[in-house]
Image (spheres, helix red, strand yellow):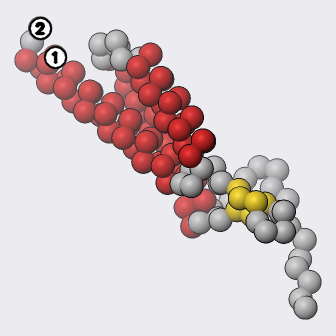
Amino acid sequence: ETMSTTAARGLTSQTALGAYRTLLRTVAATFRGDDFTLSAAKREIRQKFEENRTHAGGAALTELIAEAYDAADFIKTQVVQAEKNERGNYTMKIEKHHSDDVPPEGWVPPPPQKCS
C-alpha cells in the first residue's frame, strides 16, 4: 500500500464520517420531540453505514458518500414534522430552509383564509 493510497483512504473515511454526522444532525433537528421517529431514523442511518463499511474506496464509496449528503439535504428541505394540536388538527412548522422560489411538482395552493 502506498502513502497516497493510505492518505486517500483516510480522506474518504473522514468524508464518510462527515456524511454520517451530517445525517445524524439533520434527523435530530427534523424529528426533534419525536423520540420514536428519531430513534428509527438513527437506527436506519447506522444500519446503512454499517452495511457499506467494507468499501475500500474508489468511485463506489464516493457515490455512497454523495448519496448520504443528498439524503441529509432532502430530509432538511423536504421533510416536515406534523403535530396534532388541541383542536385535533395537524399543524406543521414550515421554516425558511423548507421553501424555495419554485413550488414542488403537484403543489396546490391553499384556499384563501376568511378574515374574522
Q: Please tell me how many numbered marks the rendered image carries.
A: 2
The kind of secondary structure element at disc 2 is loop
Q: Position of residue 106 (x, y in %)?
A: 82, 50
Quarter of the image with the C terminus in it:
bottom right
Q: Is mark 1 on a helix, strand or loop?
A: helix
Q: Distance between the residues labelled 1 and 2?
A: 6 Å
Is residue 62 positioned above or below 92 on the image?
A: above
What's the residue type where badge 2 is placed? Answer: Glu
Residue 5 % position (x, y): 16, 16
Which of 92 and 101 lies nearest the eye of the viewer? 92
Q: Would you say residue 71 is visible in this rendering?
A: no
Which residue is under mark 2?
1
In the picture of the structure, the residue carrying the numbered disc 1 is 5
Left or right: 30, with 13 as reference point: right
Q: Residue at x 44, y 28 (%)?
A: 46
Which quarter of the figure has residue 22?
top left
Q: In what quadrant of the picture does the N terminus appear? A: top left
Looking at this view, is 57 or 86 the one in front? Answer: 86
Whether the residues at callouts 1 and 2 have beta carbons within 8 Å, the answer is yes
- Taking 4 as reference, is 32 above or below it? below
Q: Position of residue 11 (x, y in %)?
A: 21, 30
Whether residue 27 sits left or right of residue 102 in the image: it is left
Which residue is depicted at the point 50% across and 30% down? 43
In x, y percent, where is residue 27?
51, 46
Residue sitting at x 49%, y 54%: 29
**Vertical arrangement, residue 116 with respect to residue 110, above or below:** below
Kindly give the residue lying farthest to the left in the view shown: 3
